Amino acid sequence: MKRRIISLFSLSLFCSVAFAQVTPNEVLSLAQSTNDYFMNKFEDPTTPTNWMKIRPSNLWTRAVYYEGLMALYDIDPQQRYIDYTDRWGDFHQWTPRNGVMTTDADDQCCSQTYLMRYVQTKEERMLRPTLENLGLQMQTKIGWWTWIDAIQMAMPVYMQAYRITGETKYRDHAMKMYRWSRNECGGGLFNADGDKLWWRDADYVPPYKEPDGKDCYWSRGNGWVYAALVRCMDQLSPKEDKAVYKALKHDFMLMTEGIAVCQRTDGFWNPSLVSTNYAMRETSGTALFLYGICWGINHGYLKAKVYRPIADKAWKALTTIVHPNGFLGWVQGTGKDPSAGQPLSYDRVPDFEDYGTGCFLLGAVEYYKLLKKQTNN
C-alpha cells in the first residue's frame, strides 16, 4: 500500500494541472442534466415500476434516487425537487415498502428520504411510520443483513432515527446488525485483514472464486457499504458517539485503501474489483466510490494530495458516460454480482435507471463540494 501511495502522490501535480479547468458549476450543470433527464422521463413519481412485474415506486431502486435528489437539493435548492419528493412520499403515506411490519432492509431504504424531509419540515406524518417499523424490527430481531447492500439500505435509517429522537437503542441496534454482517455472516463478509473489501454475501466468501482465481468483490456492493459508512457518520457525533464513530471511521479508512488500489487507469472501477472477469467501466460503483472519497477529503480524513487525483480521474471518467440528454450509460443492472446485467455498454438501458442516477448524483454533489471548498481556500 505504501508503494501505491507514493505512486499516487507522484501523479498529483499532473492531475492538478489536467483538472484545473473543472469548475464547481460545470459539475453542478452535469448533475442537473442527469436529474432533469430522469424527472422528465418519470414525470409522475407515483407510477409503479414495470420490469418483469409491477413494483411500487418506493422500492429500493427508487429510494436510492431520492438520496441523490436530496443531495442535489442541498446545493441546488429548487422547489420542484421538493415537490417531486413530497408527491412521492405523500402517495406512499411516508411508509416503508410493504408496510410497517416489514423487516426487509430493501423495504426500509425509502425511509432515508422520509426522515430527511421530517428534519426539514418537522411533520410527524413523515416520521411515525418509520419509527413504528424500526421498533417492530428491533422487537422481533428478524431481518438480519445477510447481504451487504442491506447495510446501505437500512443502517442509515437507524442512525437518522437516533439523531432525531436521541434514543440510543436505534444506534445500538444498527451496530449490532452491522457487526453481525461484518464479523459473523458467512464467517465475516469484510476481509479487513486482506483486500479490505467486502464479499457480497455468504455465497461469495472463499472458496468461491472468479474464473481467473481471484476473489469476487462486487463493485456496487462495496459501494453500498462505503456510502453507508459515510451516511451513518453524517448522523453521528465524533465526540458524543465516540466508540461507534471510531469503529465506522476505521472501516471507512480500511475500505478506502482497498478501493484506491483497484481504480482503473481510465478512472473507473471494474464490476469485479480485483478480477479480470468482466473488466470494463461501470458507473454506479464508480460514482459511489467518488462519493466516499470526496467525503473523506472534505472531512479531513483523507489526504488531498493522495486522494484528489483518484477523485479527479473518477469524475473525468463519469463525464464520459453521460449522454447529451442526461441518460447515463454503463450502469450495471440489478443483481448481486459482476455478472448481472451484462453486457454493459454506453447505450444499453439497465432494467432500472433510478439507482444509477441516485449514485451519480451522490458522487457529483460531493465532488462539487470538494471543488468549492478547495476553490474557497
Image (spheres, rainbow, N blue to C red):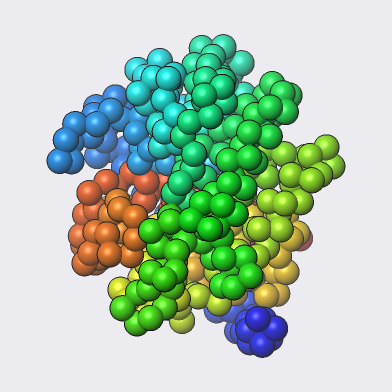
Q: Which residue is drawn at the image coordinates 30% and 53% (left, top)?
A: 335
The quadrant in which the N terminus is found is bottom right
Q: Which residue is drawn at the image coordinates 44% and 69% (left, top)?
A: 206
Judged from this view, the residue extending furthest toward the top is 124
* Nearer to the camera, 344 or 184: 184
Q: Which residue is drawn at the image coordinates 62% and 77% (left, top)?
A: 16
**Residue 85: percent from left, percent from top:** 42, 27
Q: Which residue is drawn at the image coordinates 83% and 37% (left, top)?
A: 240
Residue 44 lies left or right of residue 314; in this view the side is left
Residue 153 lies left or right of residue 371; in this view the side is left
Compared to 51, does 26 lie above or below?
below
* Nearer to the camera, 258 or 120: 258
Number of numbered callouts drawn = 0
Compared to 24, does 127 lie above or below?
above
The quadrant in which the C terminus is found is bottom right
- The answer to which quarter of the image holds residue 24 is bottom right
Judged from this view, the residue extending furthest toward the left is 52
Compared to 322, does 32 lie above or below?
above
**Residue 216: percent from left, percent from top:** 41, 69
Residue 172 lies left or right of residue 287; in this view the side is right
**Residue 250: percent from left, percent from top:** 71, 58
**Residue 167: percent from left, percent from top:** 72, 23
Residue 206 appears in view:
yes
Residue 367 appears in view:
no
